[in-house]
Amino acid sequence: MLQNIQSILKPIAFEAIGKGLQNITGASSSLDAFKMPVGDPGLYGPQSVVWKVHADFSAMMVGGLSSLMIQALHPRALAAVWDHSNFREQLKARLGRTALFVASTTYGSVEMATQSIARVNAIHAKIQGIDQLGQPYKANEPDLLRWVHLIETVSFLNAYQHLAMRPLSAADCNRYVVEMNKVGEMLGATNLPTTLQDVLQAISEYEPVLSFDQRTRETLQSIENYSVGITEKPFFALILKSSFDIMPHWLLQKLQRTPDGCLQTNARRVALQIASQPVQWMLDEQGVSAVAKARMV
């Protein structure tokens, strides 16, 4: 009897959770493309740290929002997005495309991953201009790509270490950095560090060029005013607040924010861990990482 009830309720629960995730992320792509070809490990494979970290939905959301806000501190990097997209008005669509890119390069076949990277490189090749300080920029400039890559890497990693019940060892943190460099280099970033400590040092060296201007402020406002349904608002609020919690304090200060106390931060972390369990339960069974693992059998 209990098994019959579970077999009835489980699909209903999964469907409800899936709709909630689509409302939050804007992602609606089919996972069928991740099922083939059988045995293709993609760029990383199931034994990689990248597969493990990127399977954690809440960590990826927290890390993704955190990285977007920090990246907006670089005037030339922000100008490339500001001048050539409408991300502020269509933030959900942008997040959906970013989520698909990360999924494709992490869990897709080698062909899917390389095609996704080629599409991004083709877009970047067309983007150039002058920022508000009169400095020229090109979206495919290695140093700008390096900045974006470093912030994304450390943000995903910080979020995972903050939220995971079993955080990575120091050695696995360094493995994650090295593995992530593969996509970074394929996108055109150069001179990428190979340890977490060196990543943090490399980020600190960008400090002289970072600034919090009106464009940065509007970017933060767009993210903080991100539209989700009323039922997803409490969950998203935890994700948004946590995206500030994981930032290095000097970057948080650059964004003109002050860190919350340890008690408040830890309470929020535990609340998000609990709230994430139904979502992760569903994704572990039928999310993109589950589909990719099945492809390897």
Image (spheres, rainbow, N blue to C red):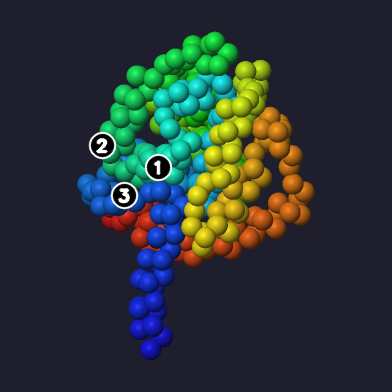
Horizontal relation, residue 239 to residue 268: left or right: left
Give the alpha-carbon distance from disc 1 to disc 2, as whole Å. 24 Å
Mark on residue 227? none
Image spot of residue 7 (x, y percent): 35, 78
Q: Is residue 198 something one can see in this rendering?
A: no
Which dot marks residue 29?
A: 3
* Residue that appears at 49% across and 65% down: 278
| Crowd around label 2: few <14 · some 14–19 · many ≥20 (10 Å) | some
Q: Earlier in the sequence, mark 3 or mark 2?
A: 3
- Place of residue 69 in the rendered image (x, y in percent of width and height, measured from the top left): 57, 35
Point out residue 285 in the picture as x, y percentages from the top left corner.
Answer: 38, 62
**Which residue type does callout 1 highlight?**
Ala
Q: Which residue is mark 2?
A: 111
Q: Secondary structure at mark 2?
A: helix
Q: Position of residue 104 (x, y in %)?
A: 34, 41
Q: Amino acid at mark 2?
A: Glu
- The residue at which mark 1 appears reads as 93
Q: Judge whether 127 appears above or below 68 on screen.
A: above
Disc 3 to disc 1, C-alpha distance: 12 Å
Pick the residue in front: 155 or 220: 220
Name above or below for residue 271 compared with residue 52: below
Front one among 191 and 68: 68
